[in-house]
Image: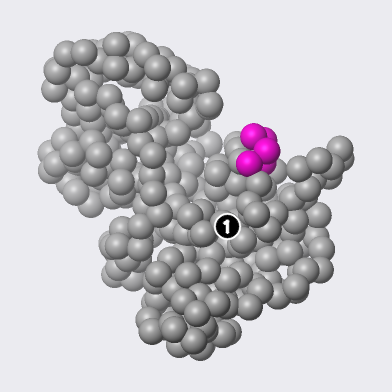
């Protein structure tokens, strides 16, 4: 099969398309013919840090069709359409085939396209777990910084579904998408500084953006919650090291470490199937354009999710 292999020690192009052996499923594993895979920050950030999957193949969010099953598999059959976040299974999605434990997968509804399904797992589950961590309730005023990306998009939709009042901080080029997602208020970060206001929000999700913990704390209500979902490594480090010192009062700070969860993924898939949330796919690349797709996301161009279709 063909796969994009990441070569950590290469001086020039580190990710190359190569012929490798098609994997064979073990007892509890399934072999999936990849139909679509989406790009996440986890892919390019792991590349930057030199944290490479054992097989050298990145790509966590996979949707495809089962071609073979291990002898002990009970949950699925050949020809089932499935979707998974394989970040806990060694990645492997930037390939024509991938093998992983049957318990990593959920069934893809027939009404949901492979491209849409691949856009869901990591971003949607991260957003869901962040809102759970922040104890989201109906009527809460929620600020989402970095609403224009994949996690931010899902956070807006899930917050609205919970009947919260949502303020989305994003770039000017994303304001039209925020209107489509029905954000109540939209703050373009190029023209407006949300941190000039005080005591407004019950919950803040910090998905992206160059804001300090002090900025976030200032706009929280006295019993508000800040959940750090993403950002640069330096921002995450500061949140972990200095966060507890800065948030000693009633205001709370949590740094989310999202985990793959088939239960949470199934919840989101059900919402997508019922059209209660509609994922926004920004661009679709073909398999031979995988390097270009990763660069597109890495450079901050993606509005929503970027998906690769495997021919």
- Label 1: how many residues lie within 10 Å, few (<14), some (14-19) or many (20+)? many
Depth check, front residue: 110 or 213? 213
Q: What residue do we see at 23% from left, 36% from top?
A: 134
Give the left or right position of residue 275, taking residue 309 as reference.
Answer: left
Q: What residue do we see at 29% from left, 11% from top?
A: 245
Give the left or right position of residue 174, taking residue 299 as reference.
Answer: left
Give, as a single range, the part of the protein colored magenta: 47-51
Give the left or right position of residue 85, taking residue 129 as reference.
Answer: right
In the rendered image, residue 263, in percent from the top left (x then y), is placed at 30, 62
Magenta: main secondary structure: helix
Color theme of the render: one colour
- Let me know if residue 236 appears in the view: yes
Q: Is residue 159 above or below residue 199?
A: below
Q: State yes or no: residue 21 in magenta.
A: no
Secondary structure type for disc 1? loop
Q: What residue do we see at 68% from left, 66% from top?
A: 95
- Let me know if residue 35 appears in the view: no
Q: Which residue is mark 1?
A: 91
In the rendered image, residue 12, in percent from the top left (x then y), is placed at 86, 40
Q: Quadrant of residue 276?
A: bottom left
């Amino acid at each position: 099969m063909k796969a994009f292999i990441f070569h950590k020690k290469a001086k020039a192009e580190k990710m190359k398309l190569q012929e490798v052996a098609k994997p064979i499923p073990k007892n509890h594993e399934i072999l999936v013919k990849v139909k679509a895979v989406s790009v996440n920050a986890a892919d390019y950030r792991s590349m930057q840090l030199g944290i490479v999957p054992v097989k050298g193949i990145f790509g966590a969010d996979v949707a495809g069709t089962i071609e073979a099953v291990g002898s002990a598999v009970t949950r699925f059959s050949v020809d089932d359409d499935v979707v998974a976040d394989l970040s806990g299974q060694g990645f492997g999605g930037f390939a024509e085939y991938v093998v992983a434990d049957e318990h990593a997968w959920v069934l893809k509804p027939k009404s949901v396209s492979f491209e849409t399904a691949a856009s869901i797992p990591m971003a949607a589950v991260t957003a869901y777990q962040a809102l759970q961590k922040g104890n989201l309730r109906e009527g809460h005023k929620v600020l989402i910084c970095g609403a224009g990306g994949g996690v931010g998009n899902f956070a807006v939709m899930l917050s609205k579904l919970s009947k919260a009042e949502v303020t989305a901080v994003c770039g000017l080029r994303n304001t039209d998408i925020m209107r489509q997602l029905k954000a109540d208020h939209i703050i373009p970060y190029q023209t407006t500084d949300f941190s000039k206001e005080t005591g407004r929000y019950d919950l803040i999700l910090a998905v992206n953006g160059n804001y300090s913990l002090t900025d976030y704390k200032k706009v929280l209500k006295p019993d508000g919650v800040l959940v750090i979902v993403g950002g640069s490594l330096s921002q995450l480090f500061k949140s972990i090291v200095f966060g507890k010192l800065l948030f000693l009062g009633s205001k709370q700070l949590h740094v989310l470490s999202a985990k793959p969860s088939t239960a949470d993924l199934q919840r989101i898939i059900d919402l997508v199937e019922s059209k209660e949330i509609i994922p926004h796919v920004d661009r679709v690349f073909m398999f031979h354009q995988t390097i270009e797709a990763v660069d597109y996301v890495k450079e901050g161009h993606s509005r929503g999710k970027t998906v690769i279709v495997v021919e």
